[in-house]
Image: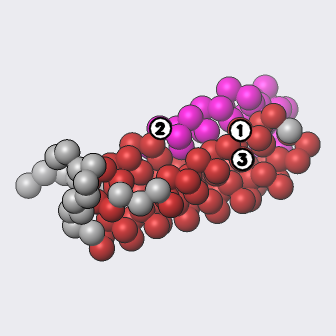
Amino acid sequence: MGFKINWDALGISASLACAIHCAVLPLVMSSLPIFGMNIIDNIRFEYFMIFLALGVGVYSLYHGWKKHHHSFLPITLFVAGIALLFAKQIWHQWQLWFLIPAVVLIVVAHYINYQACRVHDHAHADDCNH
């Protein structure tokens, strides 16, 4: 009996963790700079979270597309969400306007991918080479 990771569930969890970090952490942990710790607006941590979501998402969505459903809809939604996360870093003053739709797009992309993978156990198309 092998252990199998549900990459869509992991992607949804990473996206929600990112949203919680961006929305709740500044409110709850605003006293961290007093203790010399600054993870609020830490550029390295922000990019780490974006690249973590990107890595998990690319693996999950590619696997679903290649082995199950051949639908570009989840990939398109995911790319739009990741682009908005990078836009949030570039135009920091509007980060909340970019963050909310970014998280929604990424979570919806993983959910659609998950649903499509469950419907199509193993889809074959003309480009299927496995």
User: Which amino acid, mark 1?
Assistant: Phe
Q: Residue at x 64, y 50 (%)?
A: 80
Q: Is residue 89 above or below residue 13?
A: above
- Left or right of 90? Residue 2 is left
Seen from the viewer's position, the closer of residues 47 and 123 is 123
Q: Which mark is residue 55?
A: 2
- Percent of width and height locating residue 124: 22, 59
Q: Is residue 40 above or below residue 15?
A: above
Marks 1 and 3 close (CB-CB < 8 Å): yes
Is residue 95 shown to the viewer in this render?
yes
Q: Which mark is residue 84?
A: 3
Element under disc 3: helix
Choose top left, top right, bottom left or bottom right for residue 39: top right
User: Which amino acid, mark 3?
Assistant: Leu
- Percent of width and height locating residue 91: 86, 38
Seen from the viewer's position, the closer of residues 1 and 121 is 121
Q: Is residue 119 above or below residue 109?
A: below
Name the N-terminal-most of marks 3 and 2.
2
User: Which amino acid, mark 2?
Assistant: Gly
Q: Residue at x 68, y 49 (%)?
A: 21
Q: Does the magenta portion include 41?
A: yes
Q: Residue at x 19, y 51 (%)?
A: 3
Read off the residue under disc 1. Answer: 86
Seen from the viewer's position, the closer of residues 118 and 50 is 118
- Left or right of 87? Residue 3 is left
Q: Which class describes the residues within 10 Å of circle 1: few (<14), some (14-19), or many (20+)?
A: some
Element under disc 1: helix
- Magenta region, residue range: 28-56
